[in-house]
Image (spheres, rainbow, N blue to C red):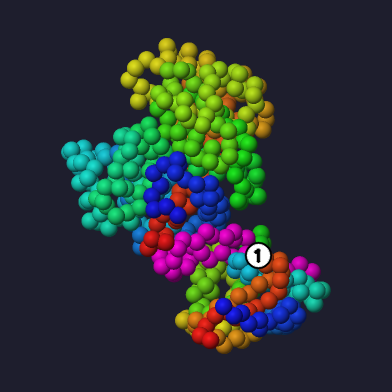
Amino acid sequence: MMRHLLSTAGVSRDEALLLLDTAEDMAAVSGREVKKLPTLRGRTVVNLFFEDSTRTRVSFEVAAKRLSADVINFSAKGSSVSKGESLKDTAQTLAAMGADGVVVRHQASGAPHTLATSGWIDAGVVNAGDGTHEHPTQALLDAFTIRRRLHGSASRGKGLDGVRVTIVGDVLHSRVARSNLWLLTTLGARVRFIAPATLLPFGIDGWPVDIGHDLDEAIDERPEVLMMLRIQSERMHAAYFPNEREYSRQWGLDDSRLSRLPATTMVMHPGPMNRGLEISAAAADSPASTILEQVANGVSVRMSVLYHLLATGEDA
Amino acid sequence: MAARTVLQAPDIQRAITRIAHEIVESNRGSSDLVLLGIPTRGVELAERLARTIERIDDTAPLVQRGALDVTMYRDDLARRPIRAPKPTDIPASGIDGKTVVLVDDVLMSGRTIRAALDAIGDIGRPRAVRLAVLVDRGHRELPIRPDFVGKNLPTARSERINVRLSDTDGVDEVAVEGGEA
């Protein structure tokens, strides 16, 4: 098993299945009266968040605490980072405090990689979202959610072979779309991106993905999974589409599009949602929606990742 | 490496039948009994014990059984290559107030059982916990002793005990391997 989780691109099918199967066991713990395992007792996990986040940080915090690790939350606001401390100094400070694992979110793509390979700190690094690069645990929890909806309690050991996943919206800024593309493809799914041409990344031609621009056409293909991405206004420093109403009309999952989907299609969203923009309230709250399952599964998947990265002491 | 077979299929079946009788006897029947096997082969042993108990004690037709994975409770996680946990499956009626019989194939250091006791404590509060093993090979490192033993098998530390069971491995057999010749 790997020592860091920086990207889903290098994760093999066996490793991915191991992480997902372990998450199944972790999910069982969440249903018990004592929702805690002693596995990481005495280990320290630092949540190092340079970018705003509620659900991911809380999810990692709950995951680490359920494994009995000590958790230190460190956010850029109100810390020395806002006084101009560099990533290197922050990392060395955490190393001196004896962190065993660092969960890092950073606005710069590649920051977790730097942290893992620089030698500033000898801890397992989990990428919790870096710039527009990757968000591996989100992809794992999405794969876990899809697998559970498809196979229920018989999910263990199964991949996602032949499952058609259509990812819609702001692919350009989406680390979720990238991580999902690599992981879902590794697990055997067929991924499609549907987006306005302005919101597709440069150089996408070499990726193992079908590209389309028409959401209605994509819905008529009746995919098993429709994943709506958030419009990331905070990263949009140019006009990528005329206005929000125009975007919503062309690429939003509204009530009429929802009604055309087969009942078996699952509607996913990584959150936080812009209700009424990329997804209507009815779609978000419909039985097809997996959005709350995704949040619950996030804890199980992150427990699995922390276990595999941190439970072993020596290089195994 | 030479492997020496010490228990063959009929021996194993006889041991399971005897342990089943002993469990029913000490529990005064098979009510409020939960057999929890420790993966991998403890689960199959628990299943076979449960079926045998159902056969010999027809007053209570269904013996509760399940699987208890202890990977997350081990004290040697940091010293070994990482292990993938196996499923834990506790009967829906729970273990509170019941007599839990832990079932494993080989008892040696006792550390697995220590971990299992911790795991049980997080799941519920049984009236009593007992331990049944197919083979007790000695070399205890903790104050733990089995209540029901298939066979006591004194071994050298350097030897390996291989338990094979029909559902898991296609054959019933206990063999000793290795050690100084």
Residue drawn at the location 53% of the way across and 41% of the way down: A186
Q: A119 or B13, which lies in front?
A: A119
Q: A55 or A102, which lies in front?
A: A102
In the image, is B33 to the left or to the right of A212?
A: right
Q: Is residue B86 magenta?
A: yes
Residue drawn at the location 26% of the way across and 38% of the way down: A77
Residue B85 in the image: state x and y as whole percent: 54, 60
Type of amino acid at the residue the image marks with label 1: Gly
The answer to whether residue B109 is visible is yes
Residue B105 in the image: state x and y as whole percent: 62, 75
In the image, is A67 to the left or to the right of A90?
A: right
Crowding around mark 1 (Cα neighbors within 10 Å: few <14, some 14 to 19, many 20+) is many
In the image, is A42 to the left or to the right of A307?
A: left
Could you tell me which secondary element the residue under label 1 belongs to? strand
The answer to whether residue B146 is visible is no
Quadrant of res B178: bottom right
Majority secondary structure of magenta residues: loop
- As displayed, is residue B57 above or below residue A108? below
Q: How many marks?
A: 1
Residue stretch in magenta: B60-89
- As displayed, is residue A271 above or below residue B37? above
- As displayed, is residue B12 above or below residue B165? below
Residue A62 in the image: state x and y as whole percent: 43, 50
Residue drawn at the location 52% of the way across and 83% of the way down: B179
Q: Label 1 belongs to which residue?
A: B66
In the image, is A240 to the left or to the right of B19?
A: left
The chain under label 1 reads B
